[in-house]
Image: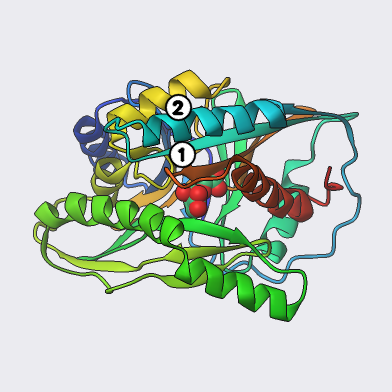
Amino acid sequence: MHARGCQAVVAETDPDELAGRVGKLLLDTGAPLAVGALPFLPGVASHVVIPRSAERAGPAAAPAARTARPVAVGRRPVPAEAEYEAAVAAAVRTLRDGSDLRKVVLARTLELDFAAPVDLPALLPGLVRANPKGYTFAAELPGTTLVGATPELLMSRSGLVVTANPLAGTLPRGADPAADRANAEALLASVKNRDEHAVVVEAVVETLRPFCTSISVPSGPELVETPTVWHLSTRVVGTLADPDVSSLRLAAALHPTPAICGTPTDLARSAIGELEPFDRGFYSGVVGWCDAAGDGEWVVAIRCAEVSGSWMRLFAGAGIMPASDPAAELAETSAKFATLLGAFGIDPV
Ligand SMILES: C=C(O[C@H]1C=CC=C(C(=O)O)[C@@H]1O)C(=O)O
């Protein structure tokens, strides 16, 4: 999907208002679709654009080989790795202390400086090549561009068919085929990861149910792989009761799922506010498109980086459960950074 130019921007915090205003603008302007992003936090405005033109480009063509590798001249993990482990340990204590918090997703960032402005279009072929099954995106936002390749579909709507594909529960890929298979099997058998996954599926189904006449949920998760990690995945498919409920309305209702925030949402959000020393902005928000009929596709904005001039900030988070081990969560977020660094052609660590 390739959108160009801008006829209007909808900056809105209320999910109903947002879907209503975007739907009306699509009808008034005759634009084929709207594209944009919702931030992680409620109360921060969306950035949904009615473009001048947009085309469905189909699957990305085989990308050209990369020419120049961007060389980072400065790197800062924020928070420092030891601080991230301390935050995970603090979250684990809260989770085990009989608090109502069941799960919280804690993220960290990696800031990179470059000698020259980052060539954004040059990053996209690498992202597509490294993540053939992912959703690659570049979203121009106020003051920054969010670029990434996420494996996670928040929801799509095509006519009355609504699909959501929550992912949660992760182990790194193995170094050789036997170790890789062993990690995949260990993930499928892991009680901690299955519990972490189940709270997301539960929340997604609970949110979609009132909008649907029927909904089908597989009895257990399956495995999906990215170049650096295995995930547990569940594909939920529902039939929409009211065709006037747009994909944007459904995406706003589903966001934030416990895959990127936690459970219950309010407690998880305040734990994130206390334990993460940075503003997530549009990371762990939602990116996608919606047309005038209400169809569209919205993905979870993870495995992504903000780019502004010669500065880049990568994000990676992990679901923290009572059984979490801080060192393993640090390793998981490092593996997630590695996917992005590899795709951008930047040397890992
Ligand atoms: C929050 C992220 O991943 C989420 C999505 C899939 C698996 C996850 C996990 O296993 O922790 C996270 O919930 C991220 O990559 O930044």
- Residue nearer the viewer, 30 or 323: 323
Quadrant of residue 181 within the rendered picture? bottom right
Q: Residue furthest bottom?
A: 178
Estimate the x, y position of residue 219 in percent, counting from the top left. Answer: 27, 74
Residue 105 badge: 1
Q: Is mark 1 within 8 Å of ligand 1?
A: yes
The answer to whether residue 177 is visible is yes
Residue at 34 percent across and 45 percent down: it is: 257
| Badge 2 amino acid | Ile
At label 1, counting other C-alpha atoms closer than 10 Å, the crowd grade (few under 14, some 14-19, many 20 or more) is: many
At label 2, counting other C-alpha atoms closer than 10 Å, the crowd grade (few under 14, some 14-19, many 20 or more) is: many
Estimate the x, y position of residue 99 in percent, counting from the top left. Answer: 30, 30
Estimate the x, y position of residue 103 in percent, counting from the top left. Answer: 38, 41
Estimate the x, y position of residue 148 in percent, counting from the top left. Answer: 61, 48
In the rendered structure, the answer to whether residue 106 lies left or right of residue 330 reads: left
Residue at 42 percent across and 43 percent down: it is: 322
Q: Look at the image and tell me in which quarter the C terminus lies.
A: top right
Quadrant of residue 271 within the rendered picture? top left
The answer to whether residue 154 is visible is no
In the rendered structure, the answer to whether residue 92 lies left or right of residue 32 reads: right
Indicate which disc, 1 or 2, sits on the residue closer to the N terminus.
1
Residue linked to disc 2: 272
Count of numbered tags: 2
Label pair 1/2, CB-CB below 8 angstroms:
yes
- Residue nearer the viewer, 179 or 23: 179
- Residue nearer the viewer, 338 or 10: 338
CA distance separating discs 1 and 2? 7 Å
**SS at mark 1?**
strand
Residue at 47 percent across and 70 percent down: it is: 188
Residue 271 badge: none
